[in-house]
Each structure stands twice: as C-alpha cells, then as structure tokens.
Amino acid sequence: MKNNYSINIRLSEDMLKKLLYISEAENRTPSNQFNFMLRNNIAYFERTKGRIPDAKLKDIDISEYAEKTEN
C-alpha cells in the first residue's frame, strides 16, 4: 500500500477559483486536478533539467512538511 501525505497550501482567491474552474471542466476533484498539474510540472522539470536522482530524494526529510495518512 502506498503512503499518501497531506499538506496545506495557500492560494490566492483568483488561483483557487481558477483551480476550481479547471477541475470542473476536466471532471476532476480539486485535489486530483492539483495532483495532475503537479505531476505534469515535475515531468516538465525533469525533461528540461534532468531526472531528479533517487539518492537526492532519499535525503529529503518530509516529516516537518507533511502528515502521513494511510489510503
């Protein structure tokens, strides 16, 4: 089972409204739409700057940024 993490983000009113608009247009929940956009952004970053090494990811401590939830 994969671990899922929950984080809080701050959005301007305009960005929130646009996220909700796009979510509805794409028939996704806001959470699923945000994850979709984030995956695309990560893919773009890795295409243009190179793959993020697994060793670098293992060194990142996420405990202060996220609360683990089970799904």
Image (tube, rainbow, N blue to C red):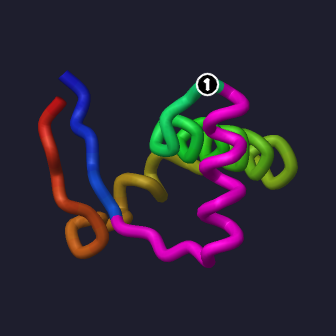
Residue at (44%, 51%) from the top-left corner? 55
Main SS of the magenta part reads helix
- With 27 as the anchor, is 25 left or right in this view? right
Residue at (61%, 49%) from the top-left corner? 20
- Which residue is at the front of the view, 25 or 67? 25
Across and down, in percent, residue 17 comes to 65, 60
Classify mark 1: helix, strand or loop.
loop
- With 58 as the anchor, is 51 left or right in this view? right
* Figure quadrant of residue 61: bottom left
- Which residue is at the front of the view, 31 or 13? 13
- Which residue is at the front of the view, 22 or 9? 22
Residue 49: tell me if it is visible.
yes
Residue at (36%, 62%) from the top-left corner? 59
Quarter of the image where the C terminus is located: top left
- With 35 as the anchor, is 67 left or right in this view? left
Q: Which amino acid does label 1 sit on?
A: Asn
Across and down, in percent, residue 5 comes to 27, 49
Across and down, in percent, residue 6 comes to 28, 54
Residue 51: tell me if it is visible.
no
* Figure quadrant of residue 65: bottom left
In the figure, 29 relative to 11: above or below? above
In the figure, 11 relative to 7: above or below? below
The outermost residue toward the right is 48
Is 23 included in the stretch rendered in magenta?
A: yes
Magenta residues (range): 8-26
Residue at (69%, 28%) from the top-left corner? 26
Residue at which label 1 appears: 27
Is 3 included in the stretch rendered in magenta?
A: no
Across and down, in percent, residue 49 comes to 81, 54
